[in-house]
Image (spheres, rainbow, N blue to C red):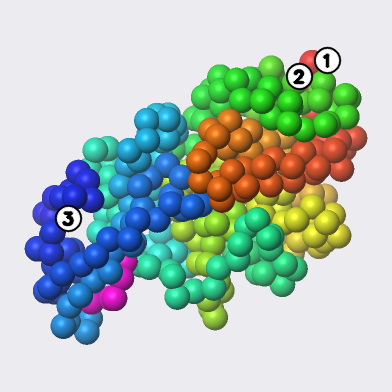
Amino acid sequence: MIESPRSFSEITPDWLSQVFGGVIDSFQLEYLEDGIGFMSEVARIHLRSNDENIPESAVMKMPSSKPQRLEMAKSFDSYNREAYFYSYIAPSLPISTPKVYFNGGAGSNFVLVLQDLAHLRRVNQIEGSERLDTLEVMRTLGRLHRKFWGQKLEAMHGYKDDIAYVAHDYPKVLPGSLEILQLRSSVKHWLETFVRNYESVMRAHLKNPCSLIHCDYKLDNLAFSANGVVVYDWGDVGVGPVGYDVAHFLVGSLTSSERQSNEREFVEEYRVELDLAEYTLQQAWNDYLRFIPATFYVAAVLVSLKEKSSRHSQLAMTNLRRVARALEDHFVAIRELYSDLPS
């Protein structure tokens, strides 16, 4: 059994030779930061070898060295979730994920060495997804959700397991975001009420259709190939309400104008690919709207971290404004969907 290194400094050509099953003469690390591996340390490994079966590069993930990110990752059990996903779930999926060269397993052994997707087309999340890409992304999401529709997957960490942590943290990060935004007073008051009652409200709405969800489905975690979309960064994966993935992508990865113009078409494309008679277009639309307020938490957290990276800061502010705009656009319908929310 190949042991996991505890840091990038412990990586050696001999260890890499064991991982790839061929002689690695030398290597070079390129540390990746902006928008990549939020809860992990990520580096691209440039490999030098005379073995033609060994790739020119790979991507390696390890636990974060930043205390705040590490604490969050442990709270969400992110490392165990991703290790489990690549071991037991990814091989059976009807969508593309990176090839795994090494999976160190759970806990302190968490290390992943994955296929480098740098050769594939990427779309800048700040600039936003365009219509044709979004249609393909929604079809991919439909195939993912259909695979495990209604299954409990008892061994998997679930969305329900995250609710208590979010309910505790949401009230802390919300005020800073509300100071930045100029929400209508009625929307602001409703959102504050939603956050105060987050745990009870979210648990009540877990009766909505569930499946395996990515839970961080966004442009920064997607690459585009000739064969479709490759989905990576599965540290938040779990069983949960499908509407969350739909809302997370459409609200966070599209410009507000693009979302406003085409969101109904995108939800319909998702439902058509899902191809389940019992799940109507109206249900899919309602579930999309229902989870827009939940995506506000992610945007608020990113803003609260006050990252030094200019791209992180720009992305955080962009996401926050996009979610706020979606909440205002659909406020009447969202408020009706949460008619059980205490006043």
The amino acid sitting under disc 3 is Ile
Question: Is residue 105 found inside the magenta-colored segment of the image?
Answer: no
Q: Give the tally of numbered discs.
A: 3
Q: Residues within 10 Å of mark 3 (few under 14, many from 20)?
A: some
Distance from the alpha carbon under mark 3 to that under mark 2: 49 Å
Between 293 and 12, the residue placed more toward the observer is 12
Residue 133, image x, y percentages: 67, 69
User: Which residue is denoted by mark 2 in the rendering?
Assistant: 193
Q: Which image quadrant: the N terminus? A: bottom left
The amino acid sitting under disc 1 is Ser
The earlier-in-sequence mark between 1 and 3 is 3
Q: Is residue 306 visible?
A: yes
Distance from the alpha carbon under mark 1 to that under mark 3: 56 Å
Dot 1 falls on a residue whose secondary structure is loop
User: Which residue is denoted by mark 1 in the rendering?
Assistant: 343
The stretch in magenta equals: 54-58
